[in-house]
Amino acid sequence: MAHFLSNTENRLLKLSSDREVFEKHAPHFSKILENSGHPSNLKFSAKNNDPNSPKKRKRPPRHKKVTYFNPPWNIALKSNLGKQFFQLIEDFFENEKSPNYIEDSIISKKTVKFSYSTTGNIKAAFSSHNKKVLNQPKKGKNDEKCHCHTIRKGVPKTCPFPDICNIQNVVYRCDVKHISGPTIGKIKSYLGLTKNKLKERVRKHLASFAVRSSEDATTLSQYVHDLKDCGVEFELKWKIEQRAKSYNGDTCQLCLAEKNQILFFPGRELLNQRTELFEACRHQEPLKFDSQIARKTKK
């Protein structure tokens, strides 16, 4: 228990400037030590209290020049690779009879360390690569120009957007331009998204423009019906704003891209409502686990 006495005494000596200060506070600490059952005879020592006494200087740690040898780990390897490696160092660099011997060489058992390195799981590496390749936007059929140019009853039908109608996973924009009435030249835009081909989504928009019951399908169809009621002629122009991947089990970059386009759309002539920014992703529902199907499979 003497170490409690020495530690308290040394601490008090370092905090006290002279003997008078030490003797003033020593009874308090002595009483604490005595109540705790430890020796309590605190003595003043001028040697430990001398502020001019030389102190030990801490040396900075020495950083050795170490070379690491990290061969890949293989569970099929049965030989002691580390032992053989250090034996080679001893034979070629530490043996004085060796022609490669150099006194105080950088390569020695003291300056070289050996440890196995591990690589990533091969199955995970292949799965990650396959997922990256398969999720890329497909080229060919989905990006080719459409073949919507047909002739019906002698009247040629042309595609309004032949360069982009087959593209999938896009955020598109529809510009509605007034070509008659007092607001001629006015343009309002609508932003939307589609996971399927763009022409399929546009076809649904055009169907909602023709039927009054589909007026509230989108804010675009509601605006078009309002223009028809006012007798204002208009023209539509379709354009792709951004391409992004749809929901793949983690996040839906397509929905995020649409919200980003709505949020930072230049100007104020936008038909989309701000409430669309808080809508949940619609592409997750088909991929969710159906509990009713699970019950049927258990039966």
Image (spheres, helix red, strand yellow):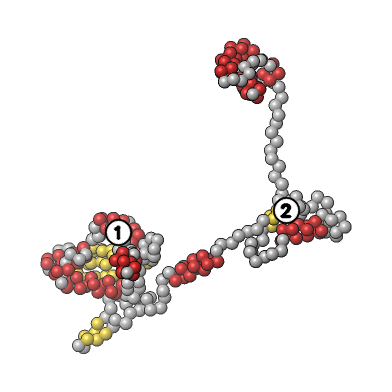
- Give the CA distance from mark 1 to mark 2: 58 Å
Residue occupying the far right of the picture:
97
Q: Position of residue 156 (x, y in %)?
A: 24, 84
When the figure is inspected, residue 202 is found, relative to residue 16, above or below; the finding is: below
Apparent side of residue 71 relative to residue 175 in the rendered image (left or right): right
Quadrant location of the C terminus in the rendered image? bottom left
Residue that appears at 14% across and 69% down: 213
Q: Dot 1 surroundings within 10 Å: few (below 14), some, or many (20 or more)? A: few
Residue occupying the far bottom of the picture:
154
Q: Secondary structure at mark 2?
A: strand
Q: Is residue 203 something one can see in this rendering?
A: yes
- In which image quadrant can residue 38 be found? top right
Residue that appears at 46% across and 68% down: 131
Name which of mark 1 and mark 2 comes first in the sequence.
Answer: 2
Residue type highlighted by circle 2: Val
Q: Which residue is mark 2?
A: 112
Quadrant location of the N terminus in the rendered image? top right
Q: Position of residue 268 (x, y in %)?
A: 26, 56
Q: Secondary structure at mark 1?
A: loop
When the figure is inspected, residue 51 is found, relative to residue 97, above or below; the finding is: above
Q: Position of residue 190 (x, y in %)?
A: 26, 64
Q: Which mark is residue 280?
A: 1
Residue that appears at 71% across and 51% down: 66
Apparent side of residue 44 relative to residue 272 in the rendered image (left or right): right
- In which image quadrant can residue 35 be found? top right
